[in-house]
Amino acid sequence: MERVETRLSGFLAAEREKWAAVDHRGPTPVDAVAALVDVGGKRLRPAFCISGFLASGGDQDDPTIVDCAAAVEFVHTGALIHDDVLDAADLRRGHPTVHNRHSLEHAAKGWRGEPRRYGEGVAILAGDLATVYAARCASALPPQAARVWGELLTEVQIGQYLDMAVAAESVIDPELSRWIAICKSGRYSIHRPLLLGAALAGRADLEPAFEAYGEALGEAFQLRDDLIDAFGSTAAAGKPVGLDLVQHKMTLLLALAARQDQRVRDLVAKPEWDVTALRERLLEIGIATRLERRIDRLVAHARGAIASAQLEPGWRDELTEMAMTVAYRDR
């Protein structure tokens, strides 16, 4: 991972220098991307990309895997910046979001136009720039890996749209909510990075095992996010919690609860949700306990998927440990 960090920081430093030479404003979107990269995060997606590569017998000195892992992190960075605009979130990783920070700067300096539109404009462009950087890092991918890469990028966009559409239309459909959760988060976080690594190592035979592992763990990952948002704390999460309920998001947690309980269905049927009452009802029906059991089953399925896969020595245990970390984080 140290080589990936060096690649990310070196790439962004070069970009900043290049655009600072044009105008002092030039690096602003670069700095927005760099600020989010610099404050860290779990680096989950690069870790799974590298793990898939090494578990498949890839050469650890191959520079392509470093670029690929950096590309995946840039995709994630761009998605977070855009997601914060869609959710009107004020914090990310304990710091002001891109659109929030630039809206406040616009207002403080008395610039022309509307501060909110300016801040969101900066965020949209910065998120797009992160995706451009991802494409540049991924430009040397061989055909099989490029196919996986294209699927990853497409799934993020379609999944994000469906998440927004289902919230707007108040659709209660656990299977659709499950698919959206896997598509917009689980696949690009775990499944696709693993397949990218395997494709780079030339191990197409591992795709079924990695797909089964990634799909199960991706759902567990999103369910944990749902639990953190519904019942966690902002201090622990590093971002505001409860936004899914405020934004009327039909998460898998909420869709399952609504199918189970009439009172939950009544609450989400209203034009404006009583978030306090909804959270209290979710606690009363024990949805958290139910989802913890579901996560346990998903982790067991993920572990079973790689139990007989032909992996490099030690990597079955490593992927098992990663599954536990992902599924049971911030409990």
Image (spheres, rainbow, N blue to C red):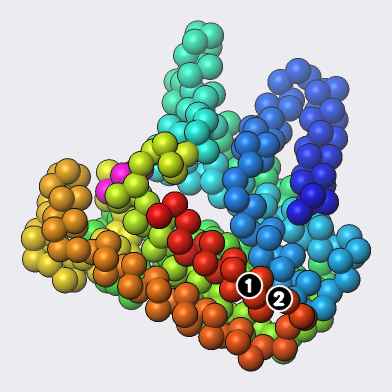
Q: Amino acid at mark 1?
A: Leu
State the SS at label 1. Answer: helix
Q: Are marks 2 and 1 in contact (CB under 8 Å)?
A: yes
| Label 2 neighbour load within 10 Å: few <14, some 14-19, many 20+ | some
Residue plotted at (67% across, 88% down): 309
Q: Is residue 200 above or below residue 168?
A: below
Occupied quadrant, residue 98? top right
Residue on which disc 2 sits: 315
Q: Quadrant of the N terminus?
A: bottom right
In the picture provided, is 73 more to the left or to the right than 217?
A: right
- Viewer can see residue 272: no
Q: Is residue 91 magenta?
A: no
- View extreme (right): residue: 61
Give the overall secondary structure of the magenta segment.
Answer: helix
User: Which label is found at residue 319?
Assistant: 1
For the record, the magenta segment spans 241-245
Q: Foreground: 244 or 316? A: 316
Where is residue 65 drawn, in percent x and y? 81, 63
Residue plotted at (91% across, 63% down): 61
